[in-house]
Image: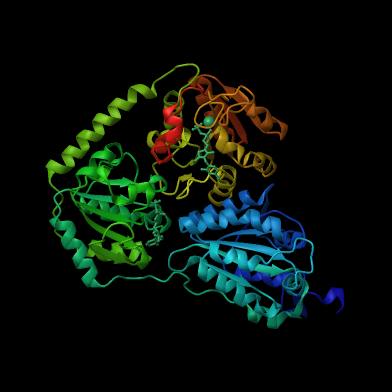
Amino acid sequence: MAEAAVKLGSDAAQAELTDGFHLIIDALKLNGIENIYHVPGIPVTDLGRMMQAEGLRVISFRHESNAGNAAAVAGYLTKKPGVCLTVSAPGFLNGLVALSHATTNCWPMILISGSSEREIVDLQKGDYEEMDQLAIAKPLGKAAYRILHAEDIGVGVARAVRAALSGRPGGVYLDIPASLLGQTMDALQGEKSLIKVVEPAPAQFPSQVAIDRALNLLKSAKKPLIILGKGASYAQCDDLVKEFVEKSGIPYIAMSMAKGLLPDDHPQYAGAARSLVLKDSDCVMLVGARLNWLLSHGKGKQWGEPFTKKFIQIDIDPKEMDSNQPIDAPLVGDIESVLTMMVKGMDGWKKPSEEWTGAVAAKSAENVEKMSGKLMSNAVPMDFHGALGRLKRIFADNPDAVLVNEGANTLDFARSIIDMYKPRKRLDVGTWGVMGIGMGTAVAAAVETGQPVVCIEGDSAFGFSGMEIETICRYKLPVCIVIFNNSGIYRGTDTDPTGRDPGTTVFVPEAKYDMMMEAFGGVGVTARTPDDLERAVREAIASGKPTLVNAIIDPQAGTESGRIGNLNPQSVVQKKK
Ligand code: ADP
Ligand code: TZD
Ligand code: MG
């Protein structure tokens, strides 16, 4: 075939031939994909280049884990699959943590990896980066597909898009052998072979019987509680969620990433009275939240056991019901459809008694008051409260800014102290509590939303993806990274009892992370006082320049594992010593 005859643009009508490269690009574009999170190399270097040339935005990372985490959270933010493109074997493997993370969090993502030819892989002839990638990816995502022929690219991409978005969203793997990319076919036939997926996540309504059951249960409750989860913020029916909560008059709490779905200063928000509402409520309605470890499986003293509660749950996945506690009123469907029906049935709704809502409000006010003193701390070296008190004000003044948060103490304190005012503004470690989501998440947040991003990072957490500050500087993204530098994991005070090495949880004391940022042309600042910190972050948001603020925190201030130290197993032998 003459080189010139191969289609190199999107004007298919005039060209005779197209090829695998272009068909993949056209199929992704046809399905609304705009951004690709990528690390180049054999066999996908040219695919990345051509994607960029054809108008997709391609963000090249330094490590596939971070590109993958970016794609995963892009899926959460946009309700479209986030796409990560990697090389074969090691690049593919690096992308798998993110694929699993996306699946675990119920976020739509597609991991596309180049691979070796089937003939070589299947007979294990020893190719460059040889691996049976499809087999390995299968158990880690919702689906995994391989495309062998150019004429199947349309089907392959369509299946990946639909699998990622339909039902409970999740990660999908798409295997692209190198030889597929160069395969040619008639351009018109190629164009016809592409599929634009129609209604990948169709509305799913529950029966009226299920709605009536739930409404009756909710009506009969004396102390009802609503728990909003990140499934509800993913659903992007923010006004409807607000209408339902306000019409019901029921106190609600928000799981970490659902914070801000309704503003955290809403009068019905019971976040500051979390212990009280979990313990004393008699009927709990879960809206896109699972009764997993993050809610102590709905069991134990925290939930007021042995007293039993009634549960209502909205979830797109019927298998979620009864996974931890019996669900008295399951509402299987998408949140928008379910809440539309619920709201319709609430005319003349009687709100819960003042006795209940008043008790919750009083407890909230008491706890907020208790906390407010600590947030004024001007101690040097800074403690978590003194530093976060200032950042809390900054977010109140900049409600459009996106907060990325990871660490242990740094995560737990920031989650409870910093209020969010708008939906999908708080992005964090998700269901697994993954350290290393930070910089990938920050890049995706900046690219997908165009808003300023402020990352609040434990110094350990930051280390997992820190090299991507080069990516942030290269693409000139409006990202401000605040490192809570307590010189270690949880604390900076551990020692090796034998005296030979540093303790297992400590780092170089007061490491100068700000100099890393300067190395790439960004702004680096050391902040030792709350005033320094506040000034630096406000300047970063105003300038939009990539900035890293190295906030020096008292190495003694943190506690083991933050708020979840109870999950650590204890050695009996050690205790006896
Ligand atoms: P959180 O960690 O905030 O509690 P989870 O990730 O545990 O939230 O739960 C989210 C739930 O939301 C999942 O069970 C998922 O199936 C569900 N979900 C996701 N999207 C929708 C939707 N559009 N409608 C209904 N349920 C959804
Ligand atoms: N590896 C991965 C991928 N995820 C994890 N969650 C961990 C390791 C274990 N881990 C945590 O759960 S928190 C944490 C680790 C290593 C770091 C805590 O230290 P930090 O935060 O500096 O980020 P604080 O503020 O010092 O507590
Ligand atoms: Mg630390």
Based on the displayed image, in which of its 4 quarters is residue 126 positioned? bottom right
- 114 relative to 185, above or below: above
Residue plotted at (39% across, 42% down):
421
Front residue of 13 and 458: 458
Q: Position of residue 33 (x, y in %)?
A: 59, 63
* Residue 62 in the figure: left or right of residue 75: right
- The mark tally for this picture is 0
- 140 relative to 456, above or below: below
Q: Position of residue 70 (x, y in %)?
A: 58, 51
Residue plotted at (21% across, 63% down):
214
* Residue 485 in the figure: left or right of residue 348: right
Front residue of 343 and 159: 159
Query: How is the protein colored in the picture?
Result: rainbow
Q: Which quarter of the rendering shows the C terminus?
A: top left
Q: Position of residue 493 (x, y in %)?
A: 53, 23
Based on the displayed image, in which of its 4 quarters is residue 377 positioned? top left
Q: Position of residue 124 (x, y in %)?
A: 75, 69
Q: Which quarter of the rendering shows the N terminus?
A: bottom right
Residue plotted at (62% across, 36% down):
546
Let me know if residue 392 appears in the view. Answer: yes
- 314 relative to 565, above or below: below
Based on the displayed image, in which of its 4 quarters is residue 193 positioned? bottom right
Let me know if residue 71 appears in the view. Answer: no
Residue plotted at (49% across, 16% down):
380
Q: Looking at this view, name the residue that lies furthest to the right.
A: 2
